[in-house]
Amino acid sequence: MKVTRRPLYLLEGANALSGLSNAIAIVTVPWLIFERTGSATQAGVVVALSAIPGIFISPFVGALIDHYGRKRVSIGSDLLSALSVMLFPIWDSLFGLTFASIATFAILGAAFDPAGYTARKSLIPDVAKASNISMDKLNSWHEAVFSAGWAIGPAIGAIAISLVGAANSMWIIFAAFMLAIVLISVLHVGDLGLEHREEINDKEKFWPSTMRGLQVLKSDKAMLYLTLSIVFLAMVYLPTESIVLPKYFSDINDPRGLGYVLSSMAIGGIGSMLAYPQLVKRFKKRSIVIGALAATALAMIPMTFFPPIGLFVLSGFLLGLGWGPMNPLMNSLVQQRVAPHIQGRVFGIQTSLFYASGPIGMFVTGVCVDTFGVRPVYTAAVVILILIQVVIMTLPSLHDLDRDPSY
């Protein structure tokens, strides 16, 4: 196969658009609810309910990827996501958005997001081979590009809200999804998953195969415990981005401040993600994990004081900088320790678990914010996060992260 960088540019272009779309949505949907209802509890309910489809759909998405191909799933999911996003402004112009309609459309859109995200992640080995790039390097670029979308997205979302309103901001997300479809449609690479499946003559039927990813993950204790650790962290942390900070900046009528803080987190992550290939050459994976946990714990402490926006942005940047290497590291673990024809299902199970972390945390956080206020809830969340991080650092299974990869 001829070596060319074109597949790299196409995949990462679609990846950036995906990050951009999700980042705009994470600002816009809660803002819509605060705007129409003023309730943090209802915002928490919607964000929590939006995560539920991903819990049940992601394992099947992984099986779809491994059985029918990575490109097909990416294109199909983005098309469905685009159509669901389009419902927000259309419904608002015809009937007006209510809590019920916002919740319905948010849940519908969330049902398709995991498929596109997982499919594009599964394409990394194919694009790395076609573009003659090391897997570690492309993993770092892939996560950095996605984060670049996240970095730009909140600012674009906040500016769009201030200019055209939250509902009409959804047209930007629609356009991004449609462009991502075009980019993946013209991406011509092999499919190592399908090729390996054919090579070993794997005839496993679709439905029985959906849980194969869970079986593989359970057999690898280091990868399993690290995955579960991130789930617990996400259960506490994600509501701070989706509920607590949006509520705080909504109360002070500063959508751009929210955009700047969320963008600074993503920008910080980009730098350390791009440094991952060098980090993994110099340090053990266990050391990278412990360093990321310690750095993020320290970065969150100043944010509990809700400082002036400049210090808030700086703390957000350091938070992203600390956590950045974890995303490419998780990708590398699956690619190095799981057979190609099963990788989609393992990514699917991980995505399902990550989505499962949201509903309880979102709902509880929303209720607590309405009951106790933003500042006490955010401080409590940071304390809990630090305690969880200390426990993770002591897990014996982390030593196995550095064994010779094989499947």
Image: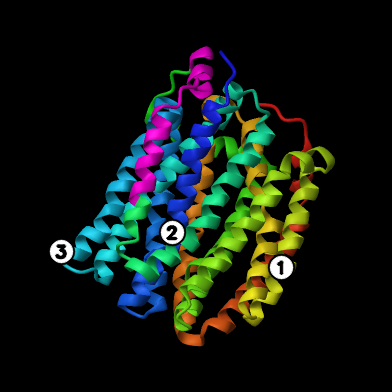
Name the image quarter holding the N terminus: top right
Q: Which residue is mark 3?
A: 94
Q: Relative to 256, is 176 on the left or the right? A: left
The main secondary structure of the magenta stretch is: helix
For residue 299, which numbered disc appears in the image? 1
* Residue type highlighted by circle 1: Ala
Front residue of 207/348: it is 348
144 vs 206: above or below: below
* Residue type highlighted by circle 2: Ile
Q: Which residue is mark 2?
A: 24
Closer mark to the observer between disc 1 and disc 2: 2
Q: Judge whether residue 404 can be spotted in this image.
A: yes
The secondary structure type at the circle numbered 1 is: helix
Give the residue furthest to the right.
Answer: 282
**Residues rendered magenta in the picture:** 174-201
Label pair 3/1, CB-CB below 8 angstroms: no
Residue 99 in percent (x, y) is at 28, 71
The secondary structure type at the circle numbered 3 is: helix
